[in-house]
Structure formats: C-alpha cells, structure tokens
Image (cartoon, grey):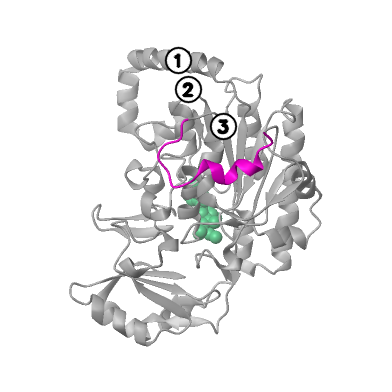
C-alpha cells in the first residue's frame, strides 16, 4: 500500500524533483494552509462523515441472506426503498455522480472506458492506463474537494476519481487504486484517519469494496457465490461498526452506505450481433455494451441510424439529441451521435467476439429505471432519523446531503438539498 506522497513520488518523478527543489517554500505554504484549516475547523465543527461504497450491491441481497450487521445498521438509521443510479449504470459514471451531484452529461465521465476525440485519448481505468489520475478527464467538484477547499480534512481509501486532483487540490490522504489491498486493511487505515486522537482526524472519509460486484459479473446476481460475498460484506460491516466503537466514534460518526448500481443476469441466447446490422468499418465504437456509443464516419449518421432503427429488437436506438430527457445524457461533447441501449439481460457484441468469448454471467450499465439496476442506500448517525424506510431517490442528491451535514457550501450541481431533508432527524 502506498500513501499519497509515495505514489506522487513514484508516478511523477519530474514533478517530485520540483517538489523537492521548492520544499521550503511549499512547507511554508502548507503550514499556512494548516493554520487556516484549524481556524476554519474551530468555527465549523461538525461530526465526521464516512461514505462507504459497496460496488454492485442490491437490496434483494440483504433480503435473501442472513445479514445481522446490515440489519443492525438499518435499524439504527434510515434506508431508502431503493436508490436510483444515473445513466449509464457503470461504475465510474455512477460513483462520480454520487461524489459530485452531477448528471453524467454535466461531468463527462460517460462510461468506464471511452474515447475522447478532443483529447485524442481513451479514458480507461484498467492497467496500463493512467487516466484516473489525470485531472483533464474529471468535470465537477467531488465532495472531498469541497471539504478540503472549505478547511475540512478529507481522506479517501478508494473512490473512482479520488486519485485525480481537481484544480490542483487533492484529499489530505488518498491512495492509488490497488484492488489487491485487503478489505480489512482498508478499514484499519480509514479508522486511523478518523480517530479523534490520531494525526489526521478526518472530517470526511471514503471506503470502497469491489468484490460483491466482481462476484456478480462472474457468477450472476442470483448465485450462491454472490450470497457468500454478501455474508463476507456483512462481516466487514460488523468490523467497521466495532472499530468505530474502538475509536470512540460510535455516537458521533455519520455513516452513509451506498452502492453504485445493481446487476442483471446475462445469457448466451440474449445477444445482439452489431456486425450483422451495420458495417463496423463505417463507425468508431466509443463504448460497446450494454450501451453502445457509436460515432459514424462523416455523412453516415442517418444511414447507420436507420439501419439500427429498422432492426430495433431487444434494444432501443436514439440519435444523441433525441435521447429521453430523463437520461440526462445528451449534452456533452464526449457523447457520440448514436446511442443504442440493450434491453436488460442483453449483450451487444459481434459474432466473432461472441464465438471466442461468450458472455459473462452478469452485467450492469442498462437503463437506470430498470429494477435490476436499482441499488442500495442506508445511513446512520447523529444527524439521521432512526428506523425509517424512505421512498426511492436519485443518487445525484447525495452530494447535497453530504455538504449539508458537513456544513459546507456546495459547488454547482444537479441535486437538490430539499429532496433528502426527510432523512435528517432535525
Ligand atoms: P465495472 O467494470 O463497472 O464492474 O467496475 C468495477 C471495477 O472498477 C472494480 O472491480 C475495480 O477493478 C475497478 N475500480 C473501482 N474503483 C477504481 C479506481 N478508483 N481506480 C481504478 N479502478 C477502479
Ligand atoms: Zn460498479
Ligand atoms: Zn461491475
């Protein structure tokens, strides 16, 4: 595990040399920052907030499993009937919307992997890509930066986008993503950062767990393997609650437990062979499935659209500007001319690719109004009501909720603070 300063040193040697060269003046500046922070904090004392993401987690996972720690958490706090993620329901767009309160067309992270024709680069989170660390990709202001900018201390142990600076600012503690870091180690670090007698005393922290989502992709949402992962997550939640007690925060910590999207079962007989509908040589594929983002060659848009429209079975196809308003997915230069959305459970692929690879057992990315994509939200702590289940709401409101309970001035966003006031105890 590398702390932020180490990753800074190893991944940016040139900047690091500059950093060393100007060490004295930087130290002075950061000394001033610290003084400003302390002063600001004294005037603006709030209870700390821990935001936890369990990737690809659905309400029904709790309903069909023994989950004593989730049950305890929910009894002590509020739970949403379900949470409505943003479209498309992929990990990077959805997490960045939770963090910024922006719909996808307003933050620009249009998928987990996509091509940007202005930057002439592909955004991709998998190795060897370095795009998650690069500020140019990320539109909007995430909650940890809002906190830092207003004198609070933020510490993130993983969150999509948390590795990038925003206008040069980063969390006081952040970590380069490494999926192999054991979950207990993530929790221990975050607890040390939240510890009121520690040296960080974070006002805001995040935790992120990916294994329930991975199990859902490999075995499908209705598998015993997912149930096993859910029970493992329940034990981790128990550990988080115990450790919160250990550092003396069980009465003070506001915890928000959230997921980014659900999971749908796929099958080998629910496939759409795109190469048999259009000539793939006439287009660039910005992204593939379950939302195909298609950039036709010049003057080919209408021809390609009409071919897709004529064969519209098990998917819906739209010209970008005709996408229903509710998707909030038209108004960004990264979104290409044609958007094709597979029906839940279907995979958009090509016959050769399918014959070589088949399809995975589970996936997400589909229409955010589909029940299979709906997801989980619960929160507990001194600001939240106890023992209440509230109607479903959209994940873009969470940023406003967090700024409200941390007493921060929100950056411009698409959420509405009033939408979630009924979660709060006063
Ligand atoms: P998805 O492909 O939409 O299922 O995304 C889930 C995967 O995203 C996880 O299994 C991780 O491999 C990856 N992931 C999550 N957070 C990060 C991050 N901060 N940086 C890079 N990859 C991440
Ligand atoms: Zn995800
Ligand atoms: Zn996933």
On screen, residue 281 versus residue 37, left or right, reads left
Q: Nearer the viewer, residue 274 or 413?
A: 413
Between the residue at mark 3 and the residue at mark 1, the CA separation in whole angstroms equals 18 Å
Magenta span main SS: loop
Instruction: Give the structural element (helix, strand or loop) at label 2.
Output: loop
Q: Are marks 3 and 1 in contact (CB under 8 Å)?
A: no
On screen, residue 313 versus residue 295, left or right, reads right
Label 1 Cα crowd, 10 Å radius (few <14 / some 14-19 / many 20+):
few
Q: Which quarter shows the N terminus?
A: top right
Label 3 Cα crowd, 10 Å radius (few <14 / some 14-19 / many 20+):
many
> Where residue 74 sits: x, y (%)?
75, 47
Q: Nearer the viewer, residue 295 or 400?
A: 400
> Where residue 292 sits: x, y (%)?
39, 70
The vertical placement of 54 against 424, above or below, is below
The vertical placement of 47 against 133, above or below, is above
Residue at the image point whose x is 52% and y is 46% from the top: 397
Q: Which quarter shows the C terminus?
A: top right
Residue of label 2:
151
Magenta region: 409-426
Mark on residue 36?
A: 1
| Lower position in the chain sequence, tag 1 or tag 2 | 1
Q: Is residue 364 visible?
A: yes
| Lower position in the chain sequence, tag 3 or tag 1 | 1
Residue of label 3:
204
């Amino acid at each position: 595990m590398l702390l932020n300063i180490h990753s800074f040193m190893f991944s940016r040697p040139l900047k690091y040399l500059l950093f060393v060269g100007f060490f004295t003046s930087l130290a002075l500046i950061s000394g001033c920052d610290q003084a400003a922070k302390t002063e600001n904090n004294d005037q603006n004392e709030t209870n700390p907030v821990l935001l936890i993401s369990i990737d690809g987690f659905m309400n029904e996972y709790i309903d069909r499993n023994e989950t004593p720690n989730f049950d305890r958490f929910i009894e002590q706090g509020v739970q949403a009937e379900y949470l409505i993620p943003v479209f498309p329901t992929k990990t990077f767009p959805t997490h960045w919307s939770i963090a910024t309160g922006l719909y996808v067309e307003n933050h620009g992270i249009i998928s987990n992997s996509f091509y940007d024709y202005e930057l002439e680069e592909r955004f991709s989170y998998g190795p060897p890509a370095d795009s998650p660390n690069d500020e140019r990709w990320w539109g909007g202001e995430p909650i940890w930066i809002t906190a830092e900018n207003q004198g609070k201390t933020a510490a993130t142990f993983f969150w999509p986008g948390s590795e990038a600076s925003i206008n040069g600012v980063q969390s006081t503690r952040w970590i380069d993503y490494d999926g192999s870091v054991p979950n207990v180690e993530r929790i221990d670090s975050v607890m040390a950062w939240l510890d009121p007698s520690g040296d960080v005393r974070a006002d805001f922290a995040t935790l992120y767990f990916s294994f329930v989502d991975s199990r859902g992709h490999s075995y499908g949402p209705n598998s015993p393997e997912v149930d096993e992962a859910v029970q493992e997550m329940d034990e981790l939640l128990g550990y988080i609650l115990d450790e919160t007690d250990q550092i003396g925060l069980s009465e003070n910590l506001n915890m928000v437990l959230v997921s980014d999207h659900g999971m749908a079962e796929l099958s080998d007989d629910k496939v759409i062979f795109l190469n048999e509908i259009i000539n793939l040589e006439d287009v660039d594929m910005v992204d593939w499935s379950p939302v195909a983002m298609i950039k036709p060659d010049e003057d080919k848009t209408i021809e390609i659209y009409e071919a897709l429209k004529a064969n519209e079975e098990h998917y819906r196809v739209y010209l970008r500007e005709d996408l229903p308003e509710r998707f909030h997915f038209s108004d960004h230069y990264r979104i290409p001319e044609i958007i094709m959305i597979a029906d839940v459970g279907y995979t958009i692929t090509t016959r050769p690719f399918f014959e070589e690879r088949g399809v995975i057992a589970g996936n997400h990315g589909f229409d955010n109004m589909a029940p299979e994509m709906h997801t989980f939200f619960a929160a507990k702590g001194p600001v939240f009501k106890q023992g209440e289940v509230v109607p479903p709401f959209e994940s873009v409101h969470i940023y406003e909720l967090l700024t409200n309970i941390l007493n921060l001035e929100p950056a411009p966003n698409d959420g509405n603070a009033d939408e979630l006031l009924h979660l709060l105890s006063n």
